[in-house]
Image (tube, grey):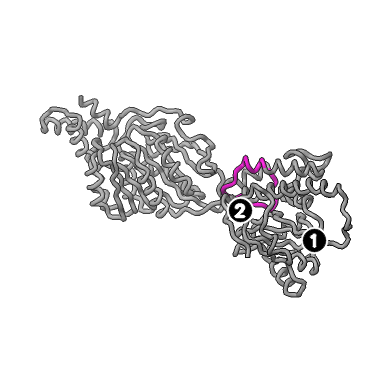
């Protein structure tokens, strides 16, 4: 009987698992972003090897340091218990580090100490993260034995940014006396006390720690780290009053959450939401760009275009393939990514494909338009959109598209096109568009002020990101005296393919723009 209690304290059932089956994969996707698991080994002060894993985003800028939360598992647990923490914290740009404590999981060591030696293992992990330049501040998230471990270490290291303490016990001796009643061991109280004293000597000899020193209430007044306490109301293994005692004695900023369930039951969603908000407030994670840009650049030459956070790879591949197919029909580009038209030629960038697609489907002497972030349509001062026109368009701080080199249209042509703007500008010909925004012609005047504005805009060209793509919305037919009055019958037949190309080009370019900018919804505005 006594030997069973001794093993219950220092040699509980050990978690044996396959990391490839029970941990997150080496590369995985979560909430539309890609992450990776970095496995490593650390050596603690007693010479035991600690198996660790660090979950980080696949793409992190070199100059950006992200906060990290170390998850501390409970008795008989392992680093697989941190899977839920990764799901909660990674989308907030908070990395997760987890380890098998000495004597647990796949790490070395024969005994556990319910937090006493585990705090030294935690110190080893913190020291490793401190040496990592891509880790900023550090938080702790512990459950059961891991909560006591975090509390004991937090009393020694005030630089920890915040702690979540789930189901911590206040005093190991009191917990052992309570478990006697829980498991209904019918022995006199003095006999139980003598047995506990005997166990104390055996544990001190084997595991090298004194169970009487594990008193979290004594460490709570020495700890000033902001902490969030959590405890299940129906927990009979470690009863809720243990967290209440620690909470009352705790010196730092604190809050406590009680929820339904027992010691090992899954935590409710509102508790995880509270944990996520807590760590977001104390760790202040920075905003980092999506990893999609780096991955797309491997396969597609996006040129000056930038991929947004919500970019869908499959959709982008479909659009680029369609663009290349359209340009193949016009004998302008290759038919598949990576294939060349002939010896010595290379696949063209997406911006070149888009420019050539718009150029070939445009009507001679018509105006082309751009749609900016606010669904404002901006005029390119030229007869067709080429690559130089596309790259000259940038979006300023007010999300307004600015023409930086498109005053090639003649003034009579501009005024003639302005005449029909109110009537035809906001109509659309592609049936799959969700909505169109307000139309506003920013076509240049021929006076000196227009050229001065263009010159001033050119100076900030390289400081901005190209976020507006050439999207032909509608071409205003221009009356020309050079056209013959008598139209042949074949003219009407030839207009149909041209109109189909126009609609197809509009659809492809609009989908590409929505895909890259990550926009899913548009608001409909009535034209003024």
Residue 495 visible in image = yes
The correct choice, above or below, for 93 with respect to 51 in the image is below
Going from N to C along the chain, the mark reached first, 2 or 1, is: 2
Q: Nearer the viewer, residue 247 or 409?
A: 409
Q: CA distance from mark 2 to mark 1?
A: 26 Å
Quadrant of the image for the N terminus?
Answer: top left
Spot occupied by residue 437 in the image (x, y as percentages of width and height): 62, 58
- Secondary structure at badge 2 equals loop
Give, as a single range, the part of the protein colored magenta.
300-318
Residue closer to the observer: 519 or 278: 519
Residue 127 within the magenta-colored segment of the rendering: no
Residue at point 86%, 47% (across, down):
490
Mark 2 residue crowding within 10 angstroms, few (<14) / some (14–19) / many (20+) = some
332 to the left or right of 203: right
Residue 417 x, y percent position in the rendering? 75, 64
Rendered view: 168 above or below 417: above
The residue pinned by badge 2 equals 435
Residue 165 position in % (x across, y down): 32, 45
Residue 313 magenta? yes
393 w.r.t. 73: above or below = below
User: Is residue 463 among what the camera can see?
Assistant: no
Left/right placement of residue 494 relative to residue 306 reads right
Residue hosting label 1: 478
> Mark 1: few, some, or many residues within 10 Å (few <14, many ≥20)?
some
- Local secondary structure at mark 1: loop
x and y percentages locating residue 396 in the rendered image:
63, 63
């Amino acid at each position: 009987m006594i030997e069973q209690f001794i093993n219950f304290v220092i040699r509980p059932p050990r978690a044996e698992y396959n990391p490839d089956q029970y941990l997150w994969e080496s590369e995985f996707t979560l909430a539309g972003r890609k992450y990776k698991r970095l496995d490593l080994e650390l050596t603690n002060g007693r010479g035991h090897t600690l198996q660790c894993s660090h979950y980080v985003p696949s793409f992190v800028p070199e100059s950006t340091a992200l906060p990290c939360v170390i998850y501390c598992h409970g008795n008989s647990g392992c680093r697989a218990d941190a899977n839920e923490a990764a799901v909660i914290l990674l989308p907030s740009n908070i990395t997760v580090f987890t380890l098998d404590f000495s004597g647990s999981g796949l790490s070395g060591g024969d005994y556990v100490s319910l937090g006493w030696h585990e705090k030294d293992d935690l110190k080893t992990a913190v020291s490793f993260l401190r040496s990592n330049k891509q880790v900023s501040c550090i938080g702790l998230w512990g459950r059961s034995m891991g909560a006591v471990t975090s509390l004991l270490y937090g009393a020694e290291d005030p630089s920890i940014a915040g702690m979540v303490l789930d189901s911590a016990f206040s005093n190991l001796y009191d917990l052992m006396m309570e478990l006697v009643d829980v498991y209904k061991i019918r022995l006199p109280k003095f006999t139980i006390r003598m047995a506990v004293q005997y166990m104390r000597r055996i544990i001190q000899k084997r595991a090298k720690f004194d169970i009487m020193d594990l008193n979290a209430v004594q460490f709570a007044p020495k700890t000033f780290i902001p902490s969030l306490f959590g405890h299940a109301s129906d927990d009979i293994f470690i009863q809720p009053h243990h967290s209440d005692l620690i909470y009352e004695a705790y010196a730092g900023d604190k809050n406590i959450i009680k929820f339904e369930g027992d010691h090992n039951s899954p935590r409710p969603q509102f508790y995880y939401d509270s944990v996520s908000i807590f760590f977001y407030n104390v760790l202040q994670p920075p905003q980092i760009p999506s990893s999609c840009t780096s991955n797309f650049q491997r396969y597609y030459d996006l040129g000056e275009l930038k991929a947004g956070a919500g970019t869908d790879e499959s959709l982008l591949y479909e659009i680029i393939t369609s663009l290349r197919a359209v340009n193949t029909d016009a004998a302008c580009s290759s038919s598949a990514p990576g294939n060349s038209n002939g010896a010595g030629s290379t696949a063209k960038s997406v911006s070149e494909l888009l420019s050539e697609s718009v150029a070939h489907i445009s009507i001679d002497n018509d105006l082309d338009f751009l749609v900016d972030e606010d669904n404002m349509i901006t005029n390119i001062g030229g007869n067709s959109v080429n690559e130089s026109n596309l790259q000259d368009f940038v979006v300023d701080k007010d999300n307004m598209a600015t023409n930086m080199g498109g005053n090639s249209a003649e003034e009579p042509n501009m005024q003639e096109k302005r005449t029909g703007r109110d009537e035809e500008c906001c109509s659309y010909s592609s049936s799959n568009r969700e909505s169109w925004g307000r139309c506003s012609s920013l076509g240049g005047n021929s006076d000196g002020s227009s050229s001065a504005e263009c010159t001033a805009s050119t100076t900030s060209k390289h400081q901005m990101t190209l976020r507006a793509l050439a999207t032909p919305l509608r071409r205003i037919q221009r009356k020309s005296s050079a056209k013959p009055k008598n139209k042949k019958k074949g003219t009407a037949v030839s207009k149909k393919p041209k109109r189909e190309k126009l609609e197809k080009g509009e659809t492809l370019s609009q989908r590409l723009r929505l895909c890259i900018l990550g926009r899913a919804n548009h608001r409909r505005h009535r034209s003024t």
